[in-house]
Amino acid sequence: MTYDRLVCANCAAPVSEGRCPVCRANRARLQQENPFSGLNPMALIALLAVLVAALALLAHQTA
């Protein structure tokens, strides 16, 4: 899950903005748990598309 959609219960601001200490702590915790959590969904889809294309190219060259 990306943290750009989470809302802080302490200050009611998006966690990605890090307005209060609770936001900053949760943002840091989420970043440590998953290094890809900072990427937006479109970047993850683009990364997946590049990996699939590389795999298809590799399969085509070996056949």
Image (cartoon, helix red, strand yellow):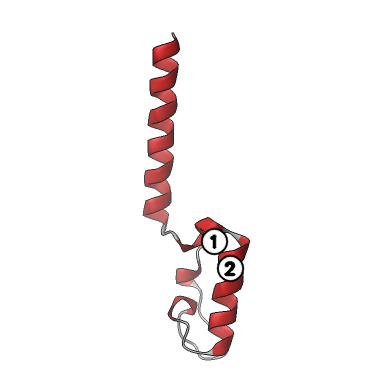
Q: Position of residue 42 (x, y in %)?
A: 37, 53
Give the residue drawn at x 51%, y 56%: 36
Q: Position of residue 54 (x, y in %)?
A: 40, 29
State yes or no: discs 2 and 1 in contact (Cβ < 8 Å). Answer: yes
- Name the residue tied to disc 1: 1
Label 2 vs label 1: CA separation? 9 Å
**From the image, which quarter does the C terminus lie in?**
top left
Q: How many marks?
A: 2
Q: Quadrant of residue 8?
A: bottom right
Give the residue drawn at x 39%, y 15%: 60
Residue 26's place in the image compared with 47, above or below, is below
Q: Position of residue 15 (x, y in %)?
A: 49, 78
Secondary structure at numbered mark 2? helix
Image disc number at residue 60:
none
Give the residue drawn at x 50%, y 79%: 7
Which class describes the residues within 10 Å of circle 2: few (<14), some (14-19), or many (20+)?
Answer: some
Q: Position of residue 56 (x, y in %)?
A: 41, 23
Give the residue drawn at x 39%, y 13%: 61
The numbered mark, 2 or 1, whose residue comes first in the sequence reads 1
Secondary structure at numbered mark 1? loop
Q: Out of 6 and 63, give the one closest to the viewer.
A: 63
Image disc number at residue 30:
2
- Residue 9 visible somewhere in the drawing: no
**From the image, which quarter does the N terminus lie in?**
bottom right
